[in-house]
């Protein structure tokens, strides 16, 4: 495998003091255990610890930082807004910041894709968008049932957990599966499955035990489930089936959206239009919390205040999010992301050629390196730790954390991308 950069990482300059964190924070903390340093500053694809140590970031806040850390264009817009005492909290009142965001979102995202969906701003995290999507689907159809898929992850609040597949997370929330039917995803650890054919049989049989549901909720690309992209044909068949039976189709684009897969929405490659779309994470532009549900105008059945929240509509996220939407109108931004995605795809092909036991999946700027048949979760953990020790942050996903999930920022330059891939390749070779 050819590389551009031979990167060495300087040794630690000082011991980190975690005592205050450990004394005051709950045992539920997670990522700090995987990446045990105290971070101080960041720019683009680089994170710096307080002792000066630099890490290349291929995690990007679980997909929240698609535009990298402290993007200068977004930062300038935020600084200007704060300097003029722009409104920082507005509930769901009309504000200049919200108007600007809605205008940019319509111009750069909705209109070019022929989408006329209404926008609902939810609480600050993606799980609240999922909660709102499920509620509006049930209210609009008068039905309660939801179909979800194995490997799904939709959030940590009760409604979102109910449509998520992970037993551990569901058990922690003491959430059962009432009103939810799980069907195997198109692909998974057990191999391909004709889930659309299965749903067709269940819905067409009056004695199947499955009532016509209110909605089907699906990730066009399962991230936490192990980086499994749905094929265009599968999504089209799902759209046709749900339309025929009057079932609403919800696409969860919280982690796969905002350009992560090469187009703004992951579902675009299938040329289908969902009834409802959930969006969060990178939509806030700068890592600022923002959560939205988009739905066809006919589904806007809410009465005022039926789904509310103190932080529904983060004004600073409106400012940064509007600026991020403007990036999509810049040829240089799109070209850079395309070039980086092609290099990531080639890296995956090189890995596959060097070790056929590795299963490589992905789309655009996300790559899954599945070690289930090549050392499993133990090897994945070793590789992740070795990457961290040599200056690269990557996350694991999949049923048993056996998949290395590679998610550089869309704005990364080739030199920094190559540096991170070099570290990752060496860790895999040593793993």
Image: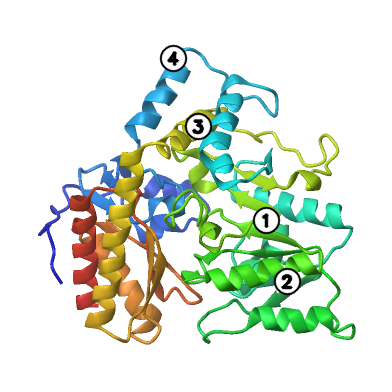
Distance from Cα at disc 4 to Cα at disc 2: 52 Å
Q: Which residue is mark 1?
A: 157
Does residue 124 appear anywhere in the picture? yes
Distance from Cα at disc 3 to Cα at disc 1: 28 Å
71 or 397, which is in the foreground? 71
Of the image marks 3 and 1, the number of the one nearer the N terminus: 1
Badge nearest the viewer, 3 or 1: 3
Asked which quadrant contains residue 155, the reply is bottom right
**Residue 321 in the image, given as x and y percentages of width and height:** 50, 35
**Residue at x-position 41% and y-position 45%:** 20
Circle 1 packing at 10 Å, graded few (<14), some (14-19), many (20+), is: some
Badge nearest the viewer, 1 or 2: 2
Badge nearest the viewer, 4 or 3: 3
SS class, disc 3: helix
Q: Which residue is mark 3?
A: 322
Of the image marks 1 and 2, the number of the one nearer the N terminus: 1
Distance from Cα at disc 4 to Cα at disc 3: 18 Å
Circle 3 packing at 10 Å, graded few (<14), some (14-19), many (20+), is: many
Callout 3 touching callout 2 (CB < 8 Å): no
Q: Which residue is mark 2?
A: 241
């Amino acid at each position: 495998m050819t590389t551009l950069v031979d990167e060495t990482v300087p040794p630690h300059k000082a011991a980190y003091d975690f005592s205050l964190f450990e004394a005051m924070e709950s045992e539920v903390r997670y990522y700090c255990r995987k990446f045990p340093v105290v971070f101080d500053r960041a720019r683009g694809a680089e994170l710096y610890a307080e002792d000066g140590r630099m890490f290349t970031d291929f995690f990007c806040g679980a997909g929240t930082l698609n535009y990298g850390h402290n993007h200068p264009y977004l930062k300038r817009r935020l600084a200007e807004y704060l300097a003029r005492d722009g409104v920082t909290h507005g509930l769901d009142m009309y504000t200049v910041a919200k108007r600007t965001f809605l205008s940019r979102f319509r111009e750069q995202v909705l209109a070019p894709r022929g989408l006329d969906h209404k926008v609902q701003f939810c609480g600050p995290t993606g799980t609240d968008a999922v909660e709102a999507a499920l509620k509006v689907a049930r209210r609009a159809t008068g039905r309660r049932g939801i179909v979800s898929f194995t490997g799904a992850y939709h959030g940590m609040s009760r409604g979102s957990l109910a449509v998520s597949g992970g037993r551990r997370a569901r058990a922690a929330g003491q959430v059962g599966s009432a009103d939810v039917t799980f069907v195997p995803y198109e692909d998974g650890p057990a191999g391909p499955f004709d889930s659309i054919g299965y749903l067709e049989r269940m819905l067409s049989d009056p004695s199947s035990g499955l009532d016509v549901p209110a909605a089907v909720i699906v990730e066009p690309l399962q991230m936490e489930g192990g980086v499994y992209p749905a094929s265009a044909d599968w999504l089209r068949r799902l759209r046709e089936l749900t339309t025929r039976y009057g079932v609403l189709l919800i696409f969860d684009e919280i982690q796969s959206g905002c350009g992560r897969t090469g187009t703004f929405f992951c579902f675009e490659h299938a040329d289908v239009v969902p009834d409802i779309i959930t969006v969060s994470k990178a939509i806030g532009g700068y890592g600022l919390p923002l959560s939205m549900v988009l739905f066809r105008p006919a589904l806007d059945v809410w009465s005022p205040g039926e789904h509310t929240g103190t932080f529904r509509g983060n004004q600073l996220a409106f400012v940064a999010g509007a600026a991020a939407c403007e990036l999509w109108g810049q040829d240089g931004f799109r070209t850079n992301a395309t070039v980086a995605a092609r290099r990531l795809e080639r890296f995956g092909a090189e890995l596959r050629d060097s070790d056929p036991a590795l299963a490589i999946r992905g789309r655009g700027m996300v790559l899954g390196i599945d070690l289930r048949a090549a050392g499993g979760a133990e090897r994945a953990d070793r590789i992740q730790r070795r990457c961290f020790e040599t200056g690269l942050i990557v996350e694991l996903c999949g049923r048993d954390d056996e998949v290395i999930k590679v998610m550089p920022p869309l704005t990364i330059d080739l030199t920094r991308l190559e540096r991170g891939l070099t570290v990752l390749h060496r860790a895999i070779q040593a793993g």
